[in-house]
Amino acid sequence: MGSEGIKKERWIDQYWVRDKSFYKKVLLILVPIVLQSIINQGVNMMDTVMVGNLGEVSISASSLANQFYNIFTFLCMGISAAGLVLSSQYFGAKDMKTVRRVFDLVLQIVILGGAAFAVVTFLLPTQIMGIFTREADVIELGAQYLRITALIYLPHGISLVFSNVMRSIGNAKLGLYVSVASFVVNIGANYVFIFGKLGAPRLGVMGAAVGTLIARSVELLFCAIYVLKFEKVLKYRIGGLLKAPTKELFREFRRLGMPAIISDSLLALAASIFSIILGHMGKEVVSAYAIVTVMDRMATVAIQGATSAAGVVIGQTVGEGAFERAQKEGWTFLILSVLIGIFGGILVLFLGEWSIGLYKIEPSTVEITVRMMEASAVIVFFQAIQSALSKGILRGGGDTKFLMIADIIFQWVASIPLGAVAGLVLHLDPAIVLVALRIDFIIKAVWLVFRLKSGKWIHKAKDMTAEG
């Protein structure tokens, strides 16, 4: 082999993992998550299509009401991420006792948070809707939707956190099983209660909330039965919920996990502000954004799987103490995210306009949706890269504090001010406003590559075996 060939091979070895066992591990996590995401987004799309047949007021009301619910969902994702960072590293270090204590802690947090959100949502639904829009008919309908939503927080939060954190021990199947059950129940219950079939009352947009409540309750039941009766690796026992975490574990959770919760909570708050900005641009823009969001999520299911796989695999590698291998795995996941981002953008361009025909919306709303869909195709590419880096690679390595700071700076100094000025002051085209609101994706897609290259993103959790 010539010198050029040797240099090329060395370059590949530095940035690309050749070990087949690595890709086997990745696929065992990625495939179930992708299938789960496809099912979940299929449910979301059917929800939007069914509610969309009731008119633009209904689709705007449910969309804006769900924006508040999404704050809790993002909080759960942050709690999941915090738990996953620690549990994947301790699993890599073969410390199963600490892994179980991490599970106890994240469930305790989500139960308290879910109860708080439920009380606020039930008591103040009209005030919550008033934050997002000034249109009285949308506020009234959204408030009715939110009262039912108040009952969903606890069952959804518990099942979501548990199925997500289970990935840290290599079990991505639970989330898939839960999603299959939810898909069947949600679609059926929505059809029955939205349109008043099989003798049930016709509840309209509230029927979608009832359908979701039933589906989330089934998820929790399914999750509890699987974890307590059939799961054999973690061997979790519910009695752990009554135990307080040790000081050392809570200190590590605060050091490596808390920044992830803060980061994802701020992301949820930022998403709500996005909705407020778009909500004050009119119900046509809100409806268009709801449709674009469904297509965006369908196009990014693969990166969700790759991101989750990156967090778990790299977390386990760091837990083992194999830092050089973690660096190489990070580059490999980054290359994969670029390829997935290109594919996702093409998917939005080709299928986005087709999906618009599934909704009964006014021609003016169609025009807005087409332009926003084209902008989304560009955004998806950068979204894939920054997601793999911030929510997968670097987070799996424990670099949560740096990522929290990056999120705060780029969301709150760049995206939100630019989006507010573009939409509410300059009244620019909604497609331009959407790009402004997502400018942090573009910045982080570049910025975090340098962080990966530096190697300073690897932070190993403290050994807990001495704690007894």
Image (cartoon, helix red, strand yellow):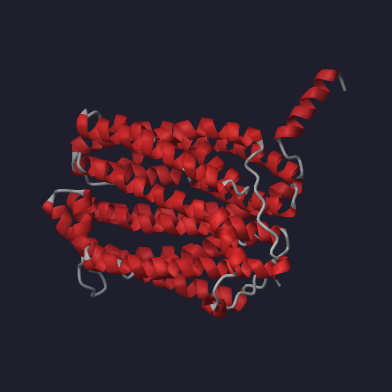
| Residue at (86, 19) in percent of width and height | 2
| Residue at (23, 75) in percent of width and height | 199
| Residue at (18, 41) in percent of width and height | 282
Q: Is residue 46 visible?
A: yes
Res. 418 image quadrant: top left
Res. 364 image quadrant: top left
453 relative to 412 in the view: left or right: right
Q: Position of residue 94 (x, y in %)?
A: 73, 63
2 relative to 30 in the view: left or right: right
Q: Position of residue 402 (x, y in %)?
A: 54, 42
Residue reaching furthest to the front: 247
Tell me if residue 113 comes above or below residue 267 in the rendering.
below
User: How many numbered discs?
Assistant: 0
225 relative to 11 in the view: left or right: left
Work out which quarter of the rendered image holds the C terminus and state it. bottom right
Residue reaching furthest to the left: 136
Tell me if residue 108 comes above or below residue 320 in the rendering.
below
Q: Position of residue 53 (x, y in %)?
A: 23, 53
Res. 189 image quadrant: bottom left
Q: Is residue 180 visible?
A: no
Work out which quarter of the rendered image holds the N terminus and state it. top right
